[in-house]
Structures are given as C-alpha cells and as structure tokens.
Image (spheres, rainbow, N blue to C red):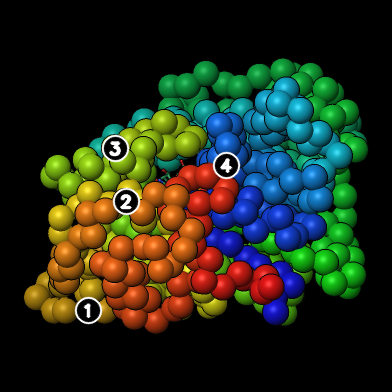
Amino acid sequence: MANSVLVLGTQWGDEGKGKIVDVLTEQASLVVRFQGGHNAGHTLVIGEEKTVLHLVPSGVLRENVTCVIGNGVVVSPEALFKEIDMLKERGVPVEDRLRISGACPLILPYHIALDQAREKAAGRHAIGTTGRGIGPAYEDKVARRAVRVQDLLSLERFDEKIDVACAYHNATLVGHGMEAVDAEAIKREARIQAERLAPLIADIPGLIDEHRKAGNRIMFEGAQGTLLDVDHGTYPFVTSSNTVAGAACSGSGCGPGTIDYVLGITKAYTTRVGAGPFPTELFDSVGEVLGERGNEFGATTGRQRRCGWYDAVAVKRASILNGITGICLTKLDVMDTLETIQVCVAYELDGKTIDHPPIGADEFARCTPVYESMPGWQANTAGITDMQALPELAQKYIARLEELTGVPIHLVSTGPERNENVVIQWPFGG
Ligand code: GDP
Ligand code: IMO
Ligand code: MG
C-alpha cells in the first residue's frame, strides 16, 4: 500500500493531472507542487462548477488537505493572489490550507517582459511559451541572482536586490527595444505582497517530514509533462524545469524513499501546445474531431492545442524516465466516434526504425511514426465507471496500450467530472 503518490504527465502536458489529483486527494492530507509556475493550467470539474488552477495545488477544494508550494516552483505573487482571490470568492478558504516555501524564486515584471521580448525576437523560431516569465525566472535561480519569497520578509534587502536585478535586466530589455521596468513600482507592490505572503511561508521539508512520520497520505502534483522536461524533453521546445519524477524530491525537500507510487497521467491520444516536434500530429478531420470533442484549448493561454494519435514510443520513454508504477488513461471518451484508431509503435528516423525518442528537437522533427491500426469502438464511454461496461474494442485498446508501454493502467478517466473514472486499482490502495 502506498502512503505517497506522485502524479505527473507522461506526454506534452494537459493530460488531466489536475482532475486526478483532485480525485485522489480525497484520501490525502498534503498536496505538494514541486516545479513549474503559473504556466500550468489544471482543470477541476465538480458538478456544474469548473475551476482552473495555475499555482495553487489541485487539492485546495478538499477540506482535509494542506496544499504546499515547494521550493522548485517559480512564484508570481500577482498570479498567486489573483488565484487566491478567485477561490475565496467561491468560498474556498485558501489561506487556511496553503503553505509556501521561502526558497521559491519570484517571477517579477522583468521576467515576463524578457520572456515576451525574446519570443517576439525569435520570430519563426519561437518556442511558443506561455509568456508568463517562467524561463527567465529559472535562469535567475540558476545564476544565483533570484529574488525569493523569503526576501519579502526583509524589505530593505529586497529593495537592494531589486535594484541590482533591474539594472541587469533592463539593459537587455532596452536592447530589445522594450521599455525598462520600474524598480520603484516593484518595491511598492512588494510592501503589499509581503504582508499577504508572510503568514503562508513555512518550513516545507519539515512539514512533509511531519506528515510522513505521522503516516499521513501525501500527494505530489507535477505540472507540464515529461516531454517538456528541460533535460529529457524535445529541447529546446521545452519548459525550463525538470518535470520528471526525480524533481519532486529536489523541488519540495524530501528523499526519493518518500515516494511510494508514481502515477503517470496519459491521454488516450496526444496533444501539444506551442511549437516543437510532434510526430503523431494530425492535420486532418480526425485531428479536428479530437480537438473539438476534447475541447483542446489551453487552460492557461486559451491557445488551440495540436492533436494527434497516441504515441507509445513517447509514453514508454516517460515510463522509464519516471519509474512509473501505474498509468491513468484519460479522455478515452473523446475517441468514441472514431472509425479507425492509429497507435504509434515506433519511429522511422533517416531510414532506420527506432523504439525510443532521439535526443533533441532536430532529430525528433525528422521522425515519422510507424502506426498500428485498430478498429474504433464507436460507442459511448462517457461517464462509464465499470471496466466491463466499456465496449469490448475500447477494452482492447486499453489492453494494447498497456502492452506497448509495459506499464499497468490502473485508472481510466471517462469524463472531466470528479467521479467519471474506471478504477482498476487505487494508487493509495484500499
Ligand atoms: P492538466 O494540465 O494535466 O491538469 O490538464 P488540463 O486541465 O489542462 O486539461 C485537461 C482537460 O481535459 C480539462 O479540460 C479537463 O476538464 C478535461 N478532462 C480531464 N479528464 C477528462 C476525461 O476523461 N474526459 C474528458 N472528456 N475530459 C477530461
Ligand atoms: P500543464 O501543467 C501544456 C509549454 C508551452 C511551451 C513550452 C514552454 O497545464 O500541463 P513556458 O511558458 O513553460 O516557458 O513554455 O511549454 N507548456 C505547457 N504545455 N501544458 C502545460 O502545463 C504547459 N506549461 C508550459 O506551451 O510550448
Ligand atoms: Mg493544463
């Protein structure tokens, strides 16, 4: 039986992580975000109400849960307060449930300006970032010039750091023909932000350890997806953090032994937002059907997601990179009308067949998929909660994906709503 479950995406993001974290936190007492920032968009549907979260962990709608933003997350105070206010308006007492690490690097106005300026300058080579300042904020962290959440507790020192950072970054911004950011405005904002943030700052490694020792159930919530990992993804068309399972430890402050079970969230087909290679991408009416039935529009930027067939090469690699225990297959219902389904089982690269993704985007972009064809079930699966009630061909599809990736499918999601799931095995057991 697992006491801690790590939920992460095995594709290019938007696999349905938020929904599943919300489902599983019924059984947990702590939910920890450990990387990314408000580039994430995690959607929770409870009855008629839809909630999109960007920074606040997807356990926040549960009374029994403490939500944690770990040191690996880059935090925009402005985005965080906007989200907290949205939740409070709906009657969710966020401040009682949320704790944040003092070591989180802050996303400040110059990061956002830099992100957008660079994307604009890159023209057709742009990455298609979310424009939230994520990359520049992580750069500052690694360059050891980040201003962190903890710095808000000592405003004199904060001001000095802001002066240094603005002098440094404004030179670049002006070089890009952009307006310099106003250091004084950042300092003024910080007075208000510090007051709101201070009560939320906590010793996160200590908190996780306490829960672990008490035998409480802990969830770790990944953002983005494995193929957007800065090391293992389709570099440079990736995000700027490690999204793989290993990052849960460094991004929150616990050891690898703390994680008992890794749940890979995997869409029954594939989507991607932004630029970069995507071997199984569809440009025909099937792609349109997936996009329409799956409502494939970014939860953060509203951009249309690119859609394609299931890529077993990619998911198999994700299973290795993350040490996946079990998979939750999501959005099966979106494929209900398809007559024929293709599954990518290998790539062809420069005349050779390969069974693993190449390193880097250039080779990845030259890969063409080798497909295996399966008949579609052409029957309703939406809302089904019992494996035996699924059409036989849908069961066959699930079994084939399991075989191809070599990882058991423990959950199948058949709709956006909290209780639309086929449970084969609960990750927490029981
Ligand atoms: P995340 O970033 O991984 O949390 O995923 P997003 O929330 O960005 O995108 C997933 C979208 O699919 C959301 O709109 C969910 O409400 C929706 N969704 C999740 N699971 C299912 C499912 O099984 N079927 C359908 N039709 N929609 C789902
Ligand atoms: P969730 O957690 C899908 C993509 C962007 C872009 C690249 C880099 O909802 O699955 P960034 O702003 O991070 O520097 O952009 O990563 N991206 C995501 N795509 N889902 C996400 O998050 C994403 N977060 C970033 O579209 O291609
Ligand atoms: Mg998303």
Q: Nearer the viewer, mark 4 or mark 1?
A: 4
Residue behind mark 2: 380
Distance from mark 1 CB to nearest ligand 2 atom below 8 Å: no
Q: Report how far apart the C-alphas of labels 4 and 3 lie in the structure.
A: 19 Å
Instruction: Determine whether, in the image, residue 351 is placed left or right of residue 378.
Output: left
Residue 427 drawn at (x, y percent):
62, 70
Give the Cα separation between the discs numbered 2 and 4. 22 Å
Give the camera-side residue of 339 and 380. Answer: 380
Residue 110 location (% of width, % of height): 59, 30
* 339 w.r.t. 173: above or below: below
First in sequence: mark 2 or mark 1?
1
Q: Is mark 4 within 8 Å of ligand 1?
A: yes
User: What kind of residue is marked 4?
Assistant: Leu
Number of numbered markers: 4
Amino acid at the residue labelled 2:
Asn
Is residue 115 placed above or below 242 in the rendered structure?
Answer: above
Q: Earlier in the sequence, mark 2 or mark 3?
A: 3
Q: Which mark is residue 44?
A: 4
* Mark 1 or mark 3, whichever is nearer to me: 3
